[in-house]
Image: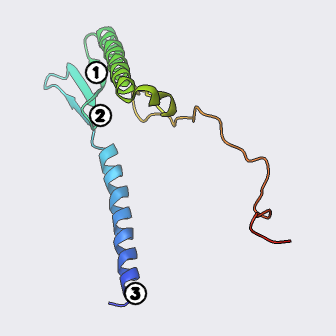
Amino acid sequence: MTPDEWLADFEAKTAELRRNAVAFRRNLEAAGQTVTSDDKALTVTVAPNGALLDLKIAQNPELAARLMALVRQAREGAAANVLGEFRNAVGGQAGQLDTDVSVPAFGTPEPRKPNHPQLVEDEDFSDNSIYRRP
């Protein structure tokens, strides 16, 4: 196999992996499930990871809303517990890590904004090499 053939084969495999990854992500995002009881009294929606996203109780929507509020509170508390244990595990390094954890109640999470300032270079020193002789 020539280097050009090897490179073409490698690029083809890489392109296929990219296509497969995109398809996997699309399918995973759609893998949640909504199920309704036979008597239509209850409907639950879960995320692909099994997390409860929504609950509907036909005869008592207020109870469903209260239950979902408790579920969100419990999820946020669990996430905070995990984050606390993570910070304990990494010790003094925790301040250097991006540990912004949010648990979306419904749907897709909003994009996170970086919580650290962007580095800006004062000047471009690329033409001032110390190795160049005058």
**Which residue corresponds to the image point at 76% horizontal and 64% vertical from the top-left?**
129
Report the amino acid beneath label 1.
Leu
Dot 2 or dot 3: first in sequence order is: 3
State the SS at label 1. Answer: strand
Give 129 or 72, whichever is nearer the viewer: 129
Dot 2 or dot 1: first in sequence order is: 2
Q: x and y percent of residue 37 in the render?
A: 16, 25
Instruction: Name the residue that disc number 3 marks.
Output: 3
State the SS at label 3. Answer: helix
**Which residue corresponds to the image point at 29% horizontal and 34% vertical from the top-left?**
47
State the SS at label 2. Answer: loop
Quick check: 78 above or below 100? above
Q: How far is disc 2 from disc 1 in space, using C-alphas? A: 12 Å
Q: x and y percent of residue 113 in the render?
A: 57, 35
Instruction: Name the residue that disc number 1 marks.
Output: 55
- Dot 3 alpha-carbon crowd within 10 angstroms: few under 14, some 14 to 19, many 20 or more: few
- Asked if the residues shown at circle 3 and circle 1 are in contact, with their CB atoms under 8 angstroms apart, the answer is no
Q: x and y percent of residue 126 in the render?
A: 75, 62
Which of label 2 and label 3 is nearer to you?
Answer: 3
- Dot 2 alpha-carbon crowd within 10 angstroms: few under 14, some 14 to 19, many 20 or more: some
Report the amino acid beneath label 3.
Pro
**Which residue corresponds to the image point at 34% horizontal and 19% vertical from the top-left?**
81
Give the quadrant of the C terminus: bottom right
- Dot 1 alpha-carbon crowd within 10 angstroms: few under 14, some 14 to 19, many 20 or more: many
Quick check: 124 above or below 12? above
Which of label 3 and label 1 is nearer to you?
Answer: 3
Quick check: 28 above or below 48? below
Q: Residue at the bottom extreme?
A: 2
Dot 3 or dot 1: first in sequence order is: 3
Residue 78 lies in quadrant: top left
